Amino acid sequence: MTTEASGKIALWKSNGYANNTLKIASYPEINPLLNFNNALILGINDGIHGYELWCISSGGSKTLIKDIYPGPSSGLGNEIVIFNDWLFFKGTSPSGT
């Protein structure tokens, strides 16, 4: 990941060679990155849904897993854990609960 002049964070993918290193997307917030069930799981603030849980498949398609707190407010907390083939994460509301 890199930070752009706009202040957004860029997400990149690479196979280790410069000619195969591509920027996937840029968002105000991207964190953390986890490999789970052959997909990339990450928290993204896309400016529309707030900071929520997203999945990028091995084919490159991006899917919002769940808008925990619908609308522009953030619903994803700051911890994601994989345990016994399940993904656990903290959810939150604008009031912090």
Image (tube, rainbow, N blue to C red):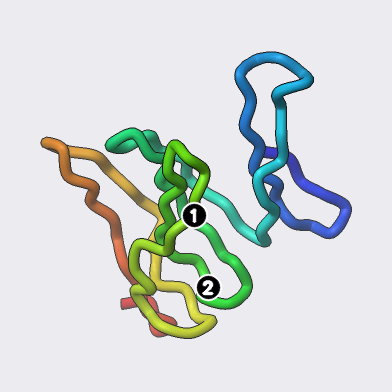
User: What numbered label is drawn on residue 50?
Assistant: 2
Which numbered disc flags the more N-terminal residue, 2 or 1?
2
Vertical order, 38 against 20 (above or below):
below
Q: Quadrant of the C terminus?
A: bottom left
Give the image location of residue 81, x and y in percent.
27, 43
Q: Position of residue 13 (x, y in %)?
A: 62, 32
Q: Nearer the viewer, residue 38 or 96?
A: 38
Tag 1's secondary structure?
A: strand
Residue 62's tag is: 1
Q: Give the farthest residue toward the front.
A: 59
The N terminus is located in which quarter? top right
Helix, strand or loop at disc 2?
loop
**Which dot, 2 or 1, sits closer to the camera?**
1
Q: Which x, y percent locates residue 36?
A: 31, 37
The quarter of the picture where residue 95 lies is bottom left
In the image, residue 91 sits, relative to residue 22, either above or below, namely below
Location of residue 17 with respect to 50 vertically, above or below: above
- The residue positioned 77% from the left and 19% from the top of the image is 18
| Residue at 23% in and 51% down | 88
